[in-house]
């Protein structure tokens, strides 16, 4: 994560570096991104960069966790604030929709975030995510347990497998529909696609699906 020298920078200077990094990661992906190009795009001396970040992975972690993560939370925060008022499937639906809204508002950040999911280097992923993924999973596992106690989720449902299924759907569904149907993120039929997908999750494939 950034050194104090970066944190102490004026906001416009920080944003200049952040915008340069996002643009480079957007165009090249993590593996092919060059710190030299980020420095050139940001218009800062090379020596200054290493006073701000330890290296490319450190910069990438900051962009993924602090910059993009904070933006995404702005879209999902309303859902989580009303979580007690919503059914389990409604919560998942609203989180998916907030993801679509994020893609619409910040398409470059969305591409960077999506590319991160496909990175094969486990050490980079572990370094970037740290404990945040574990904390998120623990939160949703607890939510699943609470909804099972209320009778909203069947007792026989495997909690870990349900969490895995939801995470998998969350990270792949937008790309899937983009590839299969040529939708774009502004296409309102994406919301309808979410409804159909979650109907399968809610009702299974036993012929009970309605709507």
Image (cartoon, rainbow, N blue to C red):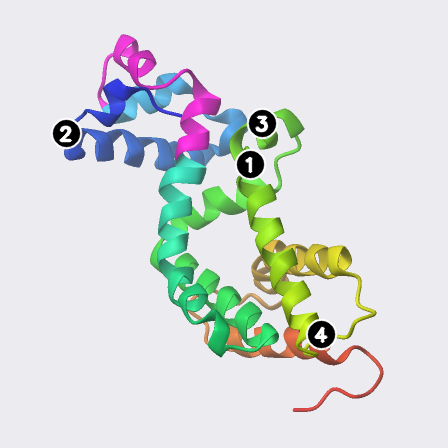
Question: Which segment is the magenta one?
Answer: 43-62
Q: Nearer the viewer, residue 108 or 130?
A: 130
Residue at 27%, 29% in the rendered image = 17
- Nearer to us of marks 3 and 1 is 1
Query: Where's residue 203, x and y in %?
Result: 74, 81
Mark 3 → mark 2, Cα distance in angstroms: 29 Å
Residue 115, given in percent of the width and then of the height, sits at: 54, 42
Judge depth for marks 3 and 4 and give the one in front.
Answer: 4
The residue where tag 1 is placed is 131
Report helix, strand or loop for mark 2: loop
Q: Nearer the viewer, mark 1 or mark 2?
A: 1
Could you tell which of marks 4 and 2 lies nearer the N-terminus? 2
Residue density around tag 3, few if under 14, some if 14–19, many if 20 or more, within 10 Å: some
Q: Secondary structure at mark 3?
A: helix
Return the residue at label 3.
124
Label 1 Cα neighbours within 10 Å, binned few <14 / some 14-19 / many ≥20: few
Which label was assigned to residue 10? Answer: 2
Q: Is residue 5 above or below residue 200?
A: above
Distance from Cα at disc 3 to Cα at disc 1: 13 Å
Residue at (53% x, 41% y) in the render: 132
Placement of 16 over or under 56, stated as above or below: below
- Residue 121 visible (yes or no): no
* Residue 201 placement (x, y as % from top left): 71, 73
The image quarter containing residue 208 is bottom right
Snapshot quadrant of residue 167:
bottom right
In the displayed structure image, the side of residue 161 where residue 147 appears, left or right: left
Quarter of the image where the N terminus is located: top left
Question: Closer to the camera, 121 or 43?
Answer: 121
| Residue matched to label 4 | 153
Secondary structure predominantly adopted by residues drawn in magenta: helix
For image coordinates 75% across by 55% down, the residue present is 160
Q: Earlier in the sequence, mark 1 or mark 4?
A: 1
């Amino acid at each position: 994560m950034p050194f104090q020298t970066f944190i102490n920078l004026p906001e416009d200077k920080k944003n200049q570096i952040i915008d340069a990094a996002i643009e480079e990661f957007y165009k090249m992906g993590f593996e092919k991104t060059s710190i030299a190009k980020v420095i050139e795009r940001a218009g800062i001396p090379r020596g200054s960069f290493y006073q701000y970040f330890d290296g490319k992975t450190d910069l990438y972690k900051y962009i993924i966790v602090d910059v993009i993560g904070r933006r995404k939370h702005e879209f999902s925060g309303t859902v989580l604030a009303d979580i007690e008022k919503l059914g389990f499937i409604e919560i998942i639906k609203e989180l998916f929709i907030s993801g679509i809204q994020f893609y619409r508002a910040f398409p470059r950040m969305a591409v960077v975030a999506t590319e991160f999911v496909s990175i094969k280097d486990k050490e980079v992923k572990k370094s970037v995510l740290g404990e945040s993924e574990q904390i998120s999973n623990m939160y949703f596992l607890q939510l699943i347990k609470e909804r099972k106690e209320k009778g909203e989720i069947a007792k026989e449902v495997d909690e870990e497998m349900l969490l895995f299924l939801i995470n998998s759907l969350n990270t792949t569904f937008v790309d899937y529909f983009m590839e299969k149907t040529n939708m774009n993120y502004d296409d309102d039929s994406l919301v309808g696609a979410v409804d159909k997908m979650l109907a399968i999750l809610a009702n299974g494939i036993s012929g009970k699906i309605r709507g």
